[in-house]
Image (cartoon, grey):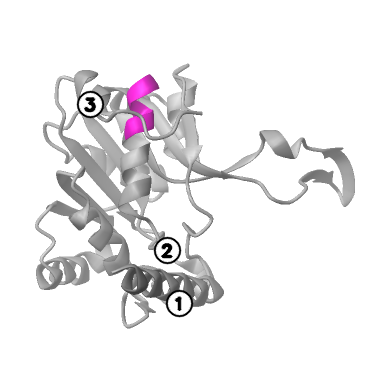
């Protein structure tokens, strides 16, 4: 796994060097007890604002498509205007499944050679993770952020252990996931059942997908406990930034 590759190779491998991002924020928040996690208060700001701010400030990103639930279109547009997210070109409604929402976002990007797909519910993303993903994707056309599994993983059926997996081969996959636009567009044109991440569709094409080191801090907020943990991580990051200034 190669880290920090020369970013110039990224632009040499595509006719268009423009990088678009699709931020997927159309989930149902079922495990949040009726609270829409994307608009829940995270250290005094909507969770979605933390995620979007990173993409707004990342120099590698040229345009952003934000995908939200139909019920949240008005709130999202108001927030984008309030926060001055100039890179947001469109805010659109998502579909029934996550992959349907991503497809909606992809269809609205214009003139992009590369796409960064990210879950809106991962507010602890950094520009460094995005940029390293773009550098890794330059080698094969596809790269995903992930972290090595720390715990022992057992395959269980009906309460009985069937197998103990080799931990050294297991990674927990995150977003961002980065693709050359023509590859991810072709992957989404193929018929497929429900998938939990975009790379799964690309793998079905026989395309190599590189894995690069994400961050254990890059959590996905799915419960109220996750919300509290994300707030702590963001406060800690802010403290380090102030100390380093």
Instruction: For the residues labelled 1 and 2, say whether their Cβ atoms are less than 8 Å apart.
Output: no
Q: Residues within 10 Å of mark 2 (few under 14, many from 20)?
A: some
| Range of magenta residues | 135-140
Observer-nearest residue: 154 or 104? 154
* Quarter of the image that includes the C terminus: bottom left
Instruction: For the residues labelled 3 and 2, say whether their Cβ atoms are less than 8 Å apart.
Output: no
**Residue matched to label 3:** 8
Residue 121 higher or lower than 234, as above or below: above
The location of residue 64, given as percent across then percent down, is 19, 49
**Residue matched to label 1:** 34
The location of residue 232, given as percent across then percent down, is 47, 75
Q: Is residue 192 visible?
A: no
The location of residue 69, given as percent across then percent down, is 30, 61
Which of labels 3 and 2 is toward the front?
A: 3
**Residue matched to label 2:** 28
Q: Is residue 77 magenta?
A: no
Report which quarter residue 60 is drawn in.
Answer: top left
In the displayed structure, does residue 118 sit left or right of residue 107? right
Task: Give the dominant element type of the magenta stretch: helix, strand or loop.
Answer: helix
The mark that comes first in sequence, 1 or 2, is: 2
The mark that comes first in sequence, 3 or 1, is: 3
Q: Is residue 136 magenta?
A: yes
């Amino acid at each position: 796994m190669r880290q920090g590759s020369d970013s110039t190779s990224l632009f040499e491998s595509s006719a268009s060097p423009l990088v678009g991002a699709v931020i997927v924020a159309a989930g149902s928040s079922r495990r949040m007890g009726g609270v829409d996690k994307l608009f829940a208060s995270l250290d005094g700001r909507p969770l979605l604002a933390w995620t979007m701010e990173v993409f707004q400030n990342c120099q590698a990103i040229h345009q952003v498509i934000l995908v939200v639930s139909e019920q949240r279109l008005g709130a999202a547009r108001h927030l984008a205007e309030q926060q001055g997210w100039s890179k947001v070109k469109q805010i659109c409604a998502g579909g029934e499944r996550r992959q349907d929402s991503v497809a909606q976002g992809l269809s609205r990007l214009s003139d992009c050679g590369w796409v960064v797909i990210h879950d809106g519910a991962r507010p602890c993303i950094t520009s460094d993770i995005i940029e390293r993903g773009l550098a890794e994707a330059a080698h094969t056309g596809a790269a995903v952020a992930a972290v090595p599994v720390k715990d022992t993983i057992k395959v269980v059926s009906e309460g009985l252990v069937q197998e103990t997996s080799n931990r050294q081969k297991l990674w927990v996959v995150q977003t961002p996931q980065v693709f050359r636009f023509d590859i991810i567009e072709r992957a989404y044109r193929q018929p497929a059942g429900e998938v939990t991440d975009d790379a799964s569709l690309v793998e079905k094409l026989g395309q190599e997908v590189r894995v690069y080191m994400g961050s254990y801090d890059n959590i996905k907020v799915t419960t109220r406990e996750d919300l509290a943990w994300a707030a702590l991580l963001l406060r800690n990051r802010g403290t380090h930034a102030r100390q380093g200034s």
